[in-house]
Amino acid sequence: MDLAFTPEEIAFRDEVRAFIRDNLPTDIRDRMRLGHSPRKEDTVRWQRILNKKGWAAHSWPKEYGGPGWSAIQRMIFLQENQVAPAPETLSFNTTMIGPVLIQFGTEAQKSRFLTRAANLDDWWCQGFSEPGAGSDLAALKTSAKREGDHYIVNGQKIWTSTAHNADWCFVLVRTNPGAAKRQEGISFLLVDMQTPGITVRPIISIDGAHHLNEVFFDNVKVPVHMRVYEENRGWDVAKYLLGNERTGIARLGKSKERVKAAKEMAREVRFNGKPLIEDGTFRQRVAQLEIDMKALEITQYRVVSAYAKQRDGRPDPLSSVLKVKGTELLQATTELAVDVGGPMAMPVWAQELASLNEPDDLLEAASAATGSYLFLRAASIYGGTNEIQKNILTKAVLRL
Ligand SMILES: Cc1cc2nc3c(=O)[nH]c(=O)nc-3n(C[C@H](O)[C@H](O)[C@H](O)COP(=O)(O)OP(=O)(O)OC[C@H]3O[C@@H](n4cnc5c(N)ncnc54)[C@H](O)[C@@H]3O)c2cc1C
């Protein structure tokens, strides 16, 4: 089993690292190093820089404007980008709708949307989940009735991340309520968010920020040529999309970057009369996280190289291990940052201290840590909950 990068992979990693170092705008890097989420304009600006280099659509083949990388190269790129820290490319565009259109879209859909998705000229969102259909996605009820050249869409989606920023939404709808199997009555539509009848209502999450929305469809007219793949075969498209979503979800680079940031904070924070970084218990906790990250890195390398070789690019059920372990680590690393910040990580304290003192990076980083700690509780829910991933592992890997 090959657990070390080849010389070519190391050369590739160094090339990616150097490009990000030389091209990531300093203001974006500084904001992210202090633990802030990228703003919409940061994501757009960085994705366009990457796209100019041919790297934004990192999982697409060359003929469609991607770099044509192997799975290992993609893994290296994603990790370097997260460690930088740089904004991640908009996954709805680069790992969801792009690959879906390449696989299932008509020529007209490909030429209309792919180049714009890579360059983030269109911001996409994902309209799958509904109040009664999350883990059990096939229970979805949003209906699309055919009337001539259009579908008339009615229903509600929920947890639609960044719908308030979005130009387009890919939506799962029920086109045949009488199908023998629920999965056989679903279609996949591309919906212009400006279409009359769409209402986007914000959901403010526990970190106090607006990431999420409810989206209501009230007699929304969607042209039939905006359906991807055959009518009532949308489930095949959704399964393909969800498989791609899961493989990139470990976000190991993000965990590494968060531990690095916590260590930097611990050099400034004093505990028992000396810097926290010198405290034995703290060092043990960091060491355990670093061991777990190394183990996950090796597992990720094994899973990615195995499916690249043996599965012709199809997701491996073992990628569920990456999702479960990766999100657990992400949650543990953000918890570490909050603990290091101590009282400064409490938003009320941070506000009060900030009003009394000069701007201070430590205070800003500590209070931002709480926001990501709180939001990332959701990491074990989105992209298929960790309980569902464990069910997949039980059946497909352990064969129980
Ligand atoms: C931050 C965030 C962003 C999201 N973004 C989007 C988005 O952009 N677009 C979109 O369409 N959706 C999005 N989602 C929705 C997400 O996909 C769903 O929340 C997820 O699939 C779980 O569905 P649910 O919330 O309905 O929970 P449920 O499915 O009702 O699950 C509730 C609990 O029961 C457990 N459970 C359910 N079924 C089983 C089972 N068979 N075995 C064991 N345990 C089970 C679950 O693990 C969970 O703990 C987002 C969610 C979050 C939190």
Image (cartoon, rainbow, N blue to C red):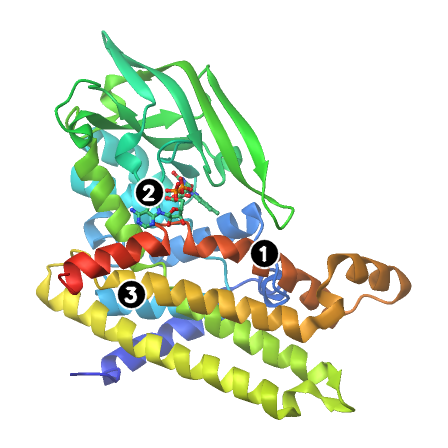
Mark-to-mark CA distance, 2 and 1: 22 Å
Quadrant (top left/top right/bottom left/bottom right) for the C terminus: bottom left
Determine crowd level at label 1: few under 14, some 14-19, many 20+ residues with C-alpha closer than 10 A.
some
Between 399 and 225, which is closer to the camera in this rendering?
399
Q: Position of residue 166 (x, y in %)?
A: 47, 34
Q: Is residue 38 left or right of residue 303?
A: right
State the residue position of label 3.
Answer: 321
Q: Secondary structure at mark 1?
A: helix
Amino acid at the residue labelled 2 = Ser
Residue 85 visible in the picture = no
**The residue positioned farthest toward the front in the image shown:** 400
Residue 344 visible in the picture = yes
Residue 135, disc: 2
Residue plotted at (15% across, 22% down):
179
Q: Position of residue 66 (x, y in %)?
A: 27, 54
Determine crowd level at label 3: few under 14, some 14-19, many 20+ residues with C-alpha closer than 10 A.
many
Q: Quadrant of residue 114?
A: top left
Quadrant (top left/top right/bottom left/bottom right) for the N terminus: bottom left
State the residue position of label 1.
Answer: 374
**Relative to 377, is 242 above or below?**
above
